[in-house]
Every structure is written in C-alpha cells, then in structure tokens.
Amino acid sequence: MTDSKQDSSSVSEIEQQLQAHASGLKAALDNGDLNSAMHTIAELGEVRDRSLYREVGRLTRSLHEALRDFEIDPGTTAHNFGLVEGTGTFALETG
C-alpha cells in the first residue's frame, strides 16, 4: 500500500474511531455515568497516541530510507567543505 493510501485509510479509521467514541462519551455524560465517560476519554487519548506513533514510524522509515540512499563521494572530506562568506551556508570548495 502506498503512503498516500495508507495515510487516507488511517485517517478514515481514526475518524471512525473518534466518531464512535464521541457518541459513546455523549451518551455516558447524558446518563450521568462519569466513570464510563472518563474511560471513553482515556480511549480517545489512546486513539490519538496510536495515530501519533504510526506517523512517527512512517517518518522514521522515510528518514532511514533517505539516509540509506544518500550517497557521499568518498573522495570528499570534511576539510573540502567551507562556509560561503555572507550566506551562512556551507559549500564544497572546488579548486
């Protein structure tokens, strides 16, 4: 499954869970069942946490793949890089 399809399916899943929990929370509050309401609020936090962890995992995988695919010329050493005066950026010194 591609990242965009995964993102949309996980957003849809999260929305469904939030809607289900929201209606359960409203029913518990309407009935004065504070214990059930607090339990539902805790479950809402877990839904949020799972989506956050899923996103962190996706970003970590993307970073890992980018670093793995990043190629540096072995002939380029740290002393070949220097600050470009007036720009605040570093560049490869040639010559």
Image (cartoon, grey):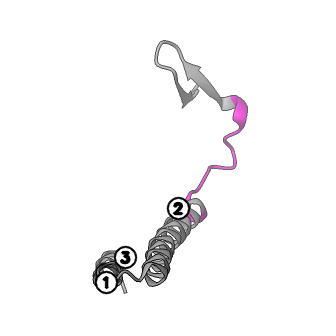
Gap between marks 1 and 3, in whole Å?
10 Å
Q: Up-down: is 61 above or below 43?
A: above
Q: Quadrant of residue 44?
A: bottom left
User: Could you tell me what secondary structure mostly forms the magenta stretch?
Assistant: loop
- Which badge, 2 or 1, comes first in the chain's sequence? 1
| Rendered-image quadrant of the N terminus | bottom left
Find residue 3 and name its label.
3
Q: Give the residues in magenta.
A: 68-79
- Give the residue type that dot 1 points to: Ser
Q: Amino acid at mark 3?
A: Asp
Q: Amino acid at mark 2?
A: Ala
Q: Where residue 71 appears, x then y in whole percent?
A: 58, 56
Which residue is identified by label 1? 9
Horizontal and vertical percent position of residue 45: 48, 72
Q: Quadrant of residue 77?
A: top right
Residue 69 lies in the magenta-colored region: yes
Q: Please state which of residues 15 and 41 is positioned toward the viewer in this rendering.
A: 41
Of the residues under marks 2 and 3, which one precedes in the sequence? Answer: 3
Residue visible at 28% across and 83% down in the picture: 23
Q: Which mark is residue 44?
A: none
Q: Nearer the viewer, mark 1 or mark 3?
A: 1
Q: Residues within 10 Å of mark 3 (few under 14, many from 20)?
A: few
Left or right relative to 19: residue 88: right
Q: Is residue 26 magenta?
A: no
Image quadrant where one finds the C terminus? top right
Residue at disc 2, secondary structure? helix
